[in-house]
Amino acid sequence: MPTVTDRYRFATRLNSFRDRGQPVAELLRAVARVPGLTAVELNYPQHLHGATESELREILAESRLALTALSLRFEGREFLDGAFTSPRAETRERAIRLSQDAVDLAGRLGVPHVDLWMAYDGFDYPFQVDYGRLWADEIDGFRRVAGHDPAIRVSVEYKPVDPRRTALIRGMGEALLAVHDVGLPNFGVQIDFCHSLMAGEQPAMAAALALREGRLFGVHLNDGYGQADDGLLVGSVHPWQTLELLATLRRHDYRGTIYFDTFPVRENPAAESAANVARVRALEAMLERIDADRLAELQASHDALGVQALLHEAGFGHDGR
C-alpha cells in the first residue's frame, strides 16, 4: 500500500498567507517553507496581477512547488448578475474568454487542471430567472471552456449558496448532471468538504459518485459546522466524515492534489497548514489500522455497531485509551 506521502500532493490556500498585500512571489516562498506542502493552486487572474509569466515560472522553480491547478475567480461588478449565466451576452462572452485564457495559461505552464467556481451563477428570488435558459447558458460555457483544449482537465466546484442565495450548481447531483450534459471526457467535478456539508451531503458518498464516473478531478479539504463555508482545520469538527472521505479516495485509488481550503484568520497560517498536513497523515495512518476485509464484511450487512467498534479500535485501541 503506497504511503500518504506518495499518494497525494498537498497544497494550501495562498490568500491565507496574505496579510499585507504581499506579491505572489513572497507568498509562494512562505508556502514553500511549510513542511509537507509540495504544491500550489493559484486563483486566476487574481494571483497573476503584478507578475509576468516568466517571473511565475522562476519562483515556482525556486520554491520547488508544483503548480497543479488554476482556479477561476470572476472579479468585478460586471459579473455580479452571473458569469456564464449573465443576462448580458457580452458579459457571458468575457467570462468564457477569461476561462479559456486560464486554460491557455495552464497549457503553457504544464498545469493539468483548471477549476471553475461559478460564484455568481444562480439567483436570489423566485421567478427571477428562467431556469432552463440559465442551465443552457451554463452548459454552453462549460462545454466551450473544456473544449478549448482537451488536454487540460476542467472541473466545476459546486457550492449551494454564497454569494448567491441559490447557486445553479448546488451539489454533486447538479455537478454530475452538468458533466453528463457537457459530454466531454476532460470535464469533471471538484469537491470541497465544507461545500458538500453545506449541501447536506455526506462528502464520502458525493465523492464516490464522481469517482464511479472517473470524474473527480480535485479535492478541497477543510471543515465546518455545515451552515457556512467555515474553512476550519481539517478533521476538527467532522473527523469521522473526513476519515471516510479519505478511505473513499483510497478505495478508488485517487491520486492528485489535496488542497487545504482553510481560513486561518486568527491562527498562524504556516502553523495551520502544517497542522492540516499532520491531520491528514494521522487519519491515513488510522486507515492503515483498519482491517479492510472486516470492514467490507460489516458494510455488506449494514452492521452499524460493528463498524463503530472497528473504527473505535483503530482510533483509540481496545480499551478506549
Image: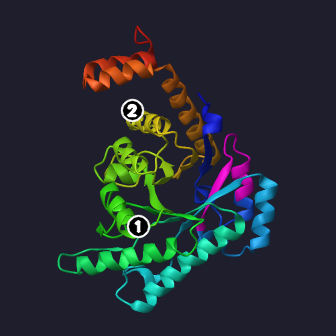
Which image quarter is the N terminus in? Answer: top right
Residue at 40% over, 46% down: 212
Amino acid type, mark 2: Trp
User: Visible in this render: residue 74?
Assistant: no
Magenta residues, as a range? 28-43
**Taking 240 as reference, is 109 left or right?**
right
Residue at 25% over, 22% down: 303
In the rendered image, residue 80, in percent from the top left (x then y), is placed at 40, 80
Crowding near pointer 1: few (<14 within 10 Å), some, many (20+)?
some
Q: Secondary structure at mark 2?
A: helix
Q: Which of the labelled discs sits on residue 183, or is there none? A: 1
Q: Is residue 12 above or below residue 311?
A: below
In magenta stretch: residue 68: no
Q: Which of the labelled discs sits on residue 240, or is there none? A: 2
Q: Residue most toward the top?
A: 319
In magenta stretch: residue 31: yes
Q: Nearer the viewer, mark 1 or mark 2?
A: 1
Pick whichever, 24 or 171, lies toward us.
Answer: 171
**Taking 219 as reference, is 176 left or right?**
left
